[in-house]
Image: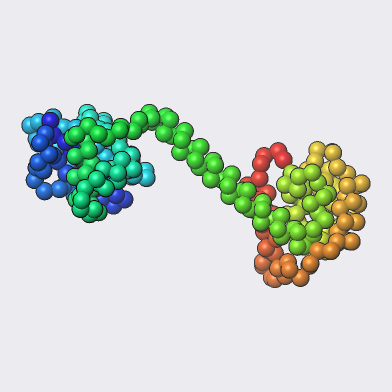
């Protein structure tokens, strides 16, 4: 049995092959992270007479493509947690950190049977994991934008937050997308504001709510000069933030 350790990187990978006694066979093989590079390591492994056991590190997402091609080709591939190889590396007197040494460490860890194999989920689970991570990142972005909007409102219209149970509901976002500060909302036509509230709240809000909002705006302690002046062809920054949130906000709110 031969043991191949592959050190994973973004642009290229490096493989070291050891025999049962830990002797290195030939020089390490560096190959690009591409279809051509993967074919290079295929040809090298398939050119050997003995059976192979292959190990690589789960480094970022860069190992996935190589893992898929190796397993599809019928190779036995083990995936190791980088913490294991780092711990094994520290057991040596010489604490060198090079690509060549890393691939040797991975191969030797596989050879002595001390590597705890990472369970690789099937492709559908990996797809769901990627989608879930992307969704969580979007949630974090929206939450961060909401905090920034609340900070802006606290400067330009501090009373506004008390006018709605949730200022990010659809009716509130509709107002803020058209009027960013207390001064702008105070100048809003009452009939237009009433119609806007009525249509976006599905009839829940009407003229009484519009009057409450205009009254709060007219008596606001908001610091109007902190809002960006509306220059020609430019949207004021508070209004731009509200509009961006309106595009990314929760449906139906």
- Residue at the (26%, 48%) spot, across then down: 90
Indicate whether 232 appears above or below 196: below
- Does 32 sit left or right of 210 as displayed? left
- Residue at the (83%, 49%) spot, across then down: 163
- The quadrant in which the N terminus is found is top left
> Residue 86 or 99: which is nearer the viewer?
86
Whether residue 231 appears in this view of the structure is: yes
Whether residue 44 appears in this view of the structure is: no
- Does 122 sit left or right of 23 as displayed? right
- Does 181 sit left or right of 124 as displayed? right
Indicate whether 44 appears above or below 213: above
- Residue at the (86%, 53%) spot, across then down: 213
Q: Position of residue 14 (x, y in %)?
A: 21, 47
- The quadrant in which the C terminus is found is top right
Q: In which quarter of the image is residue 77?
A: top left
Q: Where is residue 189 in the image (x, y as percent from the top left)?
A: 87, 57
Q: Where is residue 210 in the image (x, y as percent from the top left)?
A: 88, 50
How was this image coloured?
Answer: rainbow
Q: Position of residue 15 (x, y in %)?
A: 19, 44
- Residue at the (70%, 38%) spot, across then down: 252
Q: Quadrant of residue 82?
A: top left
Give the total number of marks visible in the rendering. 0
């Amino acid at each position: 049995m031969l043991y191949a350790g592959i050190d994973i990187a973004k642009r290229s990978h490096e493989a070291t092959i050891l025999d049962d006694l830990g002797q290195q066979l030939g020089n390490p093989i560096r190959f690009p992270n591409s279809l051509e590079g993967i074919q290079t390591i295929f040809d090298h492994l398939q050119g050997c007479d003995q059976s192979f056991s292959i190990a690589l590190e789960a480094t970022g997402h860069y190992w996935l493509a190589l893992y898929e091609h190796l397993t599809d080709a019928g190779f036995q591939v083990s995936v190791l947690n980088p913490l294991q190889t780092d711990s094994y590396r520290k057991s040596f007197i010489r604490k060198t950190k090079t690509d060549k040494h890393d691939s040797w460490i991975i191969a030797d860890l596989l050879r002595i049977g001390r590597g705890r194999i990472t369970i690789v989920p099937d492709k559908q689970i990996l797809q769901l994991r990627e989608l879930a991570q992307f969704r969580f990142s979007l949630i974090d972005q929206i939450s961060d934008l909401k905090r920034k909007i609340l900070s802006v409102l606290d400067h330009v219209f501090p009373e506004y937050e008390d006018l709605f149970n949730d200022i990010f509901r659809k009716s509130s976002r509709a107002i803020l997308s058209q009027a960013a500060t207390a001064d702008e909302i105070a100048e809003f036509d009452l009939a237009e504001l009433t119609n806007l509230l009525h249509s976006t709240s599905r009839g829940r809000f009407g003229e009484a709510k519009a009057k409450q909002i205009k009254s709060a705006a007219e008596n606001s302690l908001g610091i109007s000069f902190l809002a960006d002046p509306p220059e020609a062809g430019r949207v004021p920054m508070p209004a731009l933030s509200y509009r961006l949130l309106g595009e990314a906000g929760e449906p139906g709110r």
